[in-house]
Amino acid sequence: SWLDFDLEVTYEIQTKSVALTPDVVVAGGLACFTPYFAIDFGASAWEISGLELGGLALVCTWNGVTVKDLTVFDPGWFVITTEDYGSKIETLDDAIDDGHDYYGQYWELLSIEAVFDGCCGGTNRMLINNYFGDPSGIFGWGMSYVEACVGLSADIELSGSMTVSTTGLDALGLGIKLHW
């Protein structure tokens, strides 16, 4: 469908919070636009005092290339999860309750991912995530995460990753996967 709705209601001790995330899918899945809303309640549980736009997600996919832009307007309500948890916007409560790691210091993610066929039945993948939120960096840039996987065959994969921030190289990883 071109429009999907997901409604989350969270009850906590003496409070109630509601997050509303409608998805607008364009051109059969070529692009997806998702606003993340938080509903503010008034003095009574049945009084709605406002609707807050907490974040926006725009994801475009074409020929194995995905461009994703996530923006968080209210970091007290929404956060961007780490790569291990899908690099997506979640409510802060969900991220904590589900044990998801997140980047609370960054308000925007610009990501480019390419997946394409490799040699001998393998798959190649390249991911570049740029995070923004550091006011001292250029355009607020705070960190970049780069990951590459080369499928030498259907059973052998070489990979590497690195994390670079305003302080320099933070992490470097190399790996090999063997499937049998």
Image (tube, grey):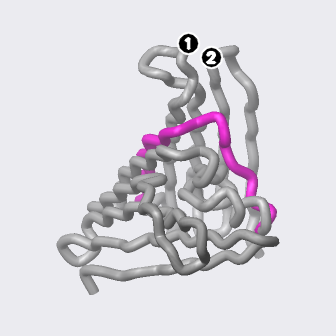
Disc 2 from disc 1: Cα separation: 9 Å
Q: Which of marks 2 and 1 is in front?
A: 1
Pick the residue in front: 160 or 150: 160
Crowding at dot 1, Cα within 10 Å, few <14 / some 14-19 / many 20+, comes out as few
Labels 2 and 1 touching (C-beta < 8 A): yes
Pick the residue in front: 73 or 173: 73
User: Label 1 is placed on what type of residue?
Assistant: Ser
Look at the numbered disc 1 and give the secondary structure of its residue: loop
Q: Which mark is residue 136?
A: 1
Q: In which quarter of the image is residue 92?
A: bottom right
Left or right of residue 119: residue 29: left
Query: How far from the left and from the top, in percent, is residue 124?
Result: 50, 55
Query: How far from the left and from the top, in percent, is residue 61?
Result: 32, 61
- Residue at 40% of width from left, 54% of height from top? 56
Look at the numbered disc 2 and give the secondary structure of its residue: loop
- Residue at 42% of width from left, 20% of height from top? 139
Sequence-wise first label, 2 or 1? 1
Question: In the rendered image, which residue does mark 2 sit on?
Answer: 166
Pick the residue in front: 109 or 90: 90
* Segment tinted magenta in the rendering: 98-116
